[in-house]
Amino acid sequence: MAHPSSAHPNVTTALLEALHFAATKHSDQRRKDKEASPYINHPIRVAQLLASEGGVTDLDLLRAAILHDTVEDTETTPEEIERHFGPEVQRIVAEVTDDKSLPKGDRKRLQVEHAPHLSIQAKQLKIADKTANVQNITTSPPDGWSLERKRDYLDWADQVVAGCRGSNPALEAVYDQVMAEGRQALAATAH
């Protein structure tokens, strides 16, 4: 019989399997900040925002959050995600994966256009992803980014998130707070 305090060992195991997979896939990657922090910090933060700030308990969504950049930024295939984590996790990851064969401007435009048509799960994932990115850009920015580039990113993130609103009010409130703090921080550096 399972120990009462370990009511959901399957949930823990499932999250750790996704984390191990993502950590292995992203092991050689670094973030663009001056410290070149480990890339895996980002998907962990996105999943953490969903769970702690958004109250998300949907295991498929939390696993997709941990895996959300694997297809886009590593050699991982959608088939691999489906084989290891099932069709639902693969579907969510696919919804938030940019087509890297397209020019950056097109990818950014398509994120704005597609946002209102995403599933509720993918919308929440997008909001958490943009929240984490806005925090990073305004507190430990990518090395060499100008003030204008940071402001452009924040403006674009707002457009993407606008199409995702109504999916998780608690998460949206955290995004709004992070965005306000980010804009304030950028305004302070402009003087």
Image (cartoon, rainbow, N blue to C red):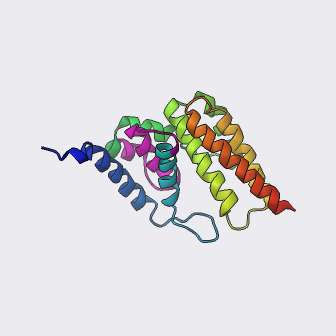
Q: As displayed, is residue 159 above or below residue 135?
A: above
Q: Position of residue 68 (x, y in %)?
A: 49, 47
Side of 12 where 46 appears, left or right: right
At a point 67% along the width and 61% down the height, the residue shown is 139
Which residue is situated farthest in the bottom direction here? 35
Q: Position of residue 54 (x, y in %)?
A: 51, 40
At a point 64% along the width and 45% down the height, the residue shown is 102
Please tell me how many numbered marks the rendered image carries: 0
Q: As displayed, is residue 161 above or below residue 130?
A: above
Q: Residue 128 appears in which quarter of the rendering?
A: top right
At a point 33% along the width and 52% down the height, the residue shown is 17
At a point 69% along the width and 67% down the height, the residue shown is 143
Q: Nearer the viewer, residue 116 or 110?
A: 116
Q: Is residue 54 magenta?
A: yes
Quarter containing the C terminus: bottom right
Side of 35 where 86 appears, left or right: left
Quarter containing the N terminus: top left
Q: Is residue 2 visible?
A: yes
Q: Is residue 134 magenta?
A: no
Which residue is situated farthest in the left direction here? 1
Q: Nearer the viewer, residue 50 or 116?
A: 50
Side of 185 where 172 appears, left or right: left
Q: Nearer the viewer, residue 84 or 132?
A: 132
Q: Position of residue 111 (x, y in %)?
A: 64, 39
Give the magenta part as a residue range. Answer: 53-82
Q: Residue 23 appears in which quarter of the rendering?
A: bottom left
Which residue is situated farthest in the front direction here? 4
Q: Position of residue 46 (x, y in %)?
A: 52, 49
Q: What secondary structure predominates along the stretch shown in magenta?
A: helix
Q: Is residue 110 visible?
A: no
